[in-house]
Image (cartoon, rainbow, N blue to C red):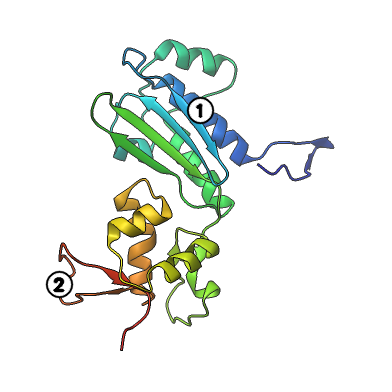
Amino acid sequence: MKKPFKLVDQVRVDETPQHDAVREALVNCLVNADFYQAWSVVIEKYPDKIVMANPGTIITGKKQMLKGGISQPRNKGLFKMFNLIGLGEHAGLGVPDIYKAWRDVGLQEPEVEERFGNPDRTILTLPLIPVVTISTKIGISVSTDYVKIGINGEQLNALMEFCQEPKTKGEMIEFLKFSSRSSFERKVLNPLLKMEQLFRTDPDNPRNPKQKYYSKKRT
C-alpha cells in the first residue's frame, strides 16, 4: 500500500487509515476464528485484493457485524491481549471502520461472505482497485447521479468484448473471477443493464433460467 508523505506535529506518519483497517481486519480474523475446526486461518495477498478467511461463522450475524455497535469475539482471551497493546476493535466498530477507510480512498467496497459446510468459514475480501464511474469511462451522458460499477476500466473493456457474443451470468462471473454471484449482480451486472451497456437475450422474461447477456444491440 502506498505511504504518502505526511507530517503531524513535525513527526512523519508512515501509515494511513487503510493500513490501520488491514490491521483491524487481521485482528478480527484471529479473535473470531473457531480454532476447534479442522481448518486454519488463511491470508492471501493478490495484486488486486487481500483475502482473509477464518474458520467459523459470524457470532452476531453478518447484518449486525456490518452495522457495528456490538462486540462479541469468539476468543475473548486473544481479544483482550490485542486490546492491551492497542489493537482490535472497540464496541464492535471495527468492520464499519474498515469499510469507511476503503470508501475514503475510493477503493471498491470490501465484501464479507459466510460459507456454511465442513468447515464453516467467514471470508473478508479487501479489493485494492478503485471504483470506476462508468459514465466517465465510456462517455455516457446521464441526468442522474453517476452509476458506479465494481470493476476497473480494463476489466470493463474486456467484459464488453467478451460479451459481444451472448454469455450466461455464470460465464461472466468466471471470466471476471468474482467469488460471489450476488456481488457480481449488484456491482457489475445490474449497473451495466441500467446503463444499457449489457442487454438480455430475453428482455421480456428477466428470470429466464436460460437468460444470456450481450454487449451490443443486434440487428
Q: Residue furthest right?
A: 10
Q: Which kind of residue does numbered mark 1 sit on?
A: Leu
The residue positioned 52% from the left and 58% from the top of the image is 131
The residue positioned 57% from the left and 51% from the top of the image is 104
Query: What kind of element bears circle 1?
Result: helix
Pointer 1 local density, CA inside 10 Å: few below 14, some 14–19, many at least 20: some
State which mark lies toward you, 2 or 1: 2
Pointer 2 local density, CA inside 10 Å: few below 14, some 14–19, many at least 20: few
Residue 189 rendering spot, x and y as whole percentages: 34, 64
Choose top left, top right, bottom left or bottom right for residue 53. top left
Residue 118 rendering spot, x and y as whole percentages: 25, 24
219 vs 204, nearest the viewer: 219
Q: Which kind of residue does numbered mark 2 sit on?
A: Asn
The answer to whether residue 69 shows anywhere in this view is no
Query: What kind of element bears circle 2?
Result: loop
- For the image, the number of numbered tags is 2
Residue 39 rendering spot, x and y as whole percentages: 36, 19
Work out whether 57 lies above or below 49.
above
The circle drawn on residue 26 is 1
Work out whether 145 lies above or below 129.
below
Choose top left, top right, bottom left or bottom right for residue 75. top left
**Residue 211 appears left or right of 90:** left
The residue positioned 28% from the left and 34% from the top of the image is 115
Q: Residue furthest bottom?
A: 219
Which callout, 2 or 1, points at the residue further toward the start of the chain?
1
The circle drawn on residue 205 is 2
The answer to whether residue 16 shows anywhere in this view is yes
